[in-house]
Amino acid sequence: MYDPKGNGKEKSIDAVRFTELEPPEHLRGIVHRFLELNTDGLLNEDYRFHALPDACTYIVFDQLDKRIAGVSKLRAESEKFNLGRQFRFVNIRFLPGVWQPSLDQVAYGMVEDAYTGALPLLEVNEALTGGALQAHIPHLSALVDGLVRDGIVKRNLVTEKIFQHLDNLHNVADMADAANLSPRQLQRTLKRTTGFSPHDFLKVLRLQMSLNGNDTWSYADQSHFIHSFRRATGYTPGKYAKKYDV
């Protein structure tokens, strides 16, 4: 099954903590993980968060500024964001393709502005006060349950079929076969539900599989893998492994 690695933590900075917890069983076709990213005290310098491409949509809650929350989606290349010297974010990482509204309603990148949308994100952010991530799961799960009832998120059977056949996917034709669609139908479906073309979606899957230990999975050769990895992350695989944990 698809197990995206959404971030790389700099090995030289121990005062930044990442916590990931699985959702309740009934949400596991919708939510990949509940996440928390926070500092232990004030850092000596600004922290630059390295966000990896994973095709997932996120709901982000800023615990240090309760006005800030929102929905974000990353691109097919990794990006760095300056989070400052002290922060605490609680996130919901949805599986690719489950977010149903128009992608025009999904903000680009990390959330920085006060939330003014119709979802009850500010109310949930107020409820996420104090305690460890485990204590917040009931509030986060209740929010997702409401999104499911309202049809804002739902399981994506096409991406689920693709994830089930990851080991046998080497090109877009393989993806179409796995999803029981024609290449043209796959193009329309993935673009509508994930925002990615099949080619770009496959690039994300390849990168994620390499981060899970399959260094040259679905690449023509080692040179092709290194080139593709550098384009997606800005690093060669060796330099990335020295600088980041995933």
Image (cartoon, grey):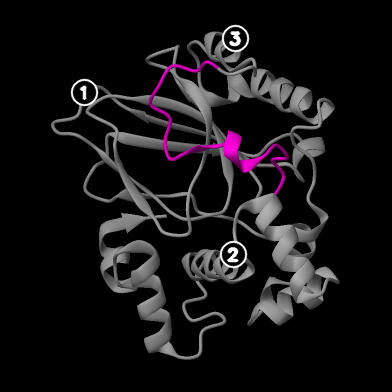
Which amino acid type is marked by label 2?
A: Phe
Q: In which quarter of the image is the N terminus?
A: bottom right
Query: What secondary structure is the stretch in magenta mostly built from?
Result: loop
Q: Contact (CB < 8 A) between labels 3 and 1?
A: no
Residue highlighted by disc 3: 123
Mark 3 and mark 1: Cα distance apart in space: 27 Å
Of the 4 image quadrants, the one containing the C terminus is bottom left
- Pointer 1 residue: 42
Would residue 111 be found to the left or right of residue 136 on screen? left
Image position of 68 with respect to 110: above or below = above
Q: Does the magenta stretch include residue 200?
A: no
Q: Give the range drawn in magenta.
A: 97-116
Vertical side of 216 occupied by 90: above or below:
above
Kind of residue sitting beneath label 1: Leu
Q: Quadrant of residue 224?
A: bottom left
Residue 13 location (% of width, % of height): 24, 42
